[in-house]
């Protein structure tokens, strides 16, 4: 499943410059490229205001404020990414280094537990944590190694954690390369896909591919930890997916059974329009071809307007014609209608909550109707002027 972009948020944190630790210039490139990838039409399609980038944050307060805000706004999925030095305190707890962090001063770093608690305190149904770090520094070009089982220190209930380091190796930032090793390979997956992989880049499929690809380059192998259904969440569509591959060559997905985007998890008008666009992508049809398949019941210009609008369609008329022309089964078309009706009803309720009732609006606002309220809760009529 792909998350609803209108109800999802991302916070990308990266420290590349340090007062007391080795610099990691590739981290700056990581942040910009990952934000661009998450905004891609083949990924989550996050708007810029829904993807916060914290490059070299000045304090833990700055990071925590952004995390708490995103955690409260996200109702579908919250993604939190950190790249930089990972440090360990005397209690073997993970610390995420900020520009002013010092090796033996844990109070100068962002405690991972603070990040974890902020994520858990939010409203999102799913959480994705990507940690491109490990523990104390080795030398220029590496982020350090340390105690094993980074994932055990960083687990979050109901989430998917993908960590750059294995139990015994360092998370590598190769000198002269544009990105760190882990994030660079992740970006390659998002941009090019996985040959022979599933139609959607589900997190477990991404993790398995990263392990193989990084090991083949003699680079550290990542770890993953899945809680509940996090493994089925997708980071995007697989650009290398081939529906004509034999069964078993595409991650266990029968290519003859193309998975239509499900409307079930849609919460917002933005998510509704985004998933409608995904239907066209899965169908492989152009807007003109969709119009032709509908018997010209829907013009290709109408298809374009339907897929490029920012608000929920006020009427249902064009949507079932579009879905049926794309090839969506009738039972799923009914599911789309149920979601459309639910979002319309929620929008109407929201408007009513913000609008005075008609009866109140008709009441004359004379001096006799206006009351002053005392601090003790009683009221008194003002005298005529």
Image (spheres, rainbow, N blue to C red):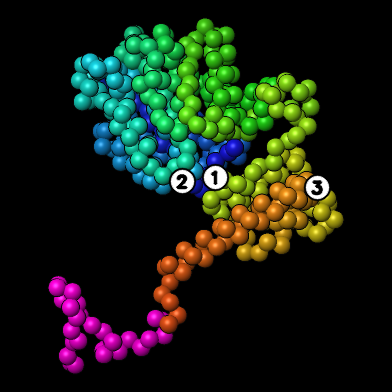
Say above or below: 283 vs 312. Answer: above
Q: Check if residue 83 falls in the magenta segment.
A: no
Residue bearing the label numbered 1: 4
Q: Check if residue 379 falls in the magenta segment.
A: yes
Number of the label disc, if any, that sits on residue 75: 2
Q: Splitting the image into 4 quarters, where does residue 299 fall?
A: bottom right
Q: Is residue 32 visible?
A: no
Prevailing secondary structure class for the magenta stretch in the rendered image: loop
Q: Answer yes or no: do the residues labelled 2 and 1 have beta carbons within 8 Å?
A: yes
Residue 146 image position (x, y, % from top left)? 34, 11
Residue 298 image position (x, y, % from top left)? 77, 58
Q: How many numbered marks are there?
A: 3
Left or right for 38, reference 61: right
Residue 328 image position (x, y, % from top left)? 75, 46
The residue nearer to you, when weighing 160 against 67, is 160
Residue bearing the label numbered 3: 289
């Amino acid at each position: 499943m792909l998350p609803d972009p209108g109800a999802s948020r991302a916070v990308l944190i990266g420290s590349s410059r340090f007062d007391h630790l080795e610099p990691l210039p590739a981290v700056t490139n990581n942040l910009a490229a990952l934000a661009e990838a998450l905004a891609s039409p083949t990924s989550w399609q996050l708007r810029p205001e829904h993807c916060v980038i914290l490059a070299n944050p000045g304090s833990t307060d700055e990071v925590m404020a952004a995390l708490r805000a995103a955690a409260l706004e996200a109702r579908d999925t919250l993604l939190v990414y950190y790249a930089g030095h990972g440090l360990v305190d005397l209690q073997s707890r993970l610390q995420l280094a900020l520009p002013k962090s010092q090796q033996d001063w844990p109070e100068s770093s962002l405690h991972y537990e603070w990040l974890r608690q902020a994520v858990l305190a939010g409203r999102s149904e799913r959480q994705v944590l990507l940690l491109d770090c490990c523990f104390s520094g080795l030398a220029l070009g590496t982020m350090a190694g340390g105690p094993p089982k980074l994932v055990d220190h960083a687990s979050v209930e109901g989430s998917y954690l993908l960590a750059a380091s294995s139990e015994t190796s360092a998370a590598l930032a190769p000198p002269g390369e544009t990105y760190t090793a882990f994030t660079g390979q992740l970006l390659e997956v998002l941009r090019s896909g996985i040959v022979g992989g599933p139609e959607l880049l589900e997190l477990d499929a991404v993790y398995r591919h990263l392990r193989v690809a990084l090991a083949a380059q003699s680079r550290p192998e990542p770890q993953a930890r899945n809680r509940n259904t996090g493994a089925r969440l997708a980071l995007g569509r697989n650009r290398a997916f081939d529906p004509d591959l034999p069964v078993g060559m595409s991650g266990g997905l029968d290519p003859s059974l193309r998975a239509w985007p499900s409307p079930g998890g849609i919460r917002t008008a933005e998510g509704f329009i985004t998933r409608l666009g995904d239907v066209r992508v899965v169908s492989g049809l152009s807007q003109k071809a969709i119009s032709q398949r509908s018997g010209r019941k829907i013009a290709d210009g109408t298809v374009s307007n339907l897929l490029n609008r920012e608000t929920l369609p006020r009427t249902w008329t064009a949507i079932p014609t579009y879905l049926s022309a794309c090839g969506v089964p009738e039972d799923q078309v009914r599911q789309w209608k149920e979601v459309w009706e639910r979002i319309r009803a929620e929008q109407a309720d929201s408007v009513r909550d913000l609008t005075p009732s008609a009866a109140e609006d008709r009441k004359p606002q004379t001096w006799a109707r206006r009351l002053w309220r005392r601090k003790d809760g009683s009221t008194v009529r003002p005298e005529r002027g």
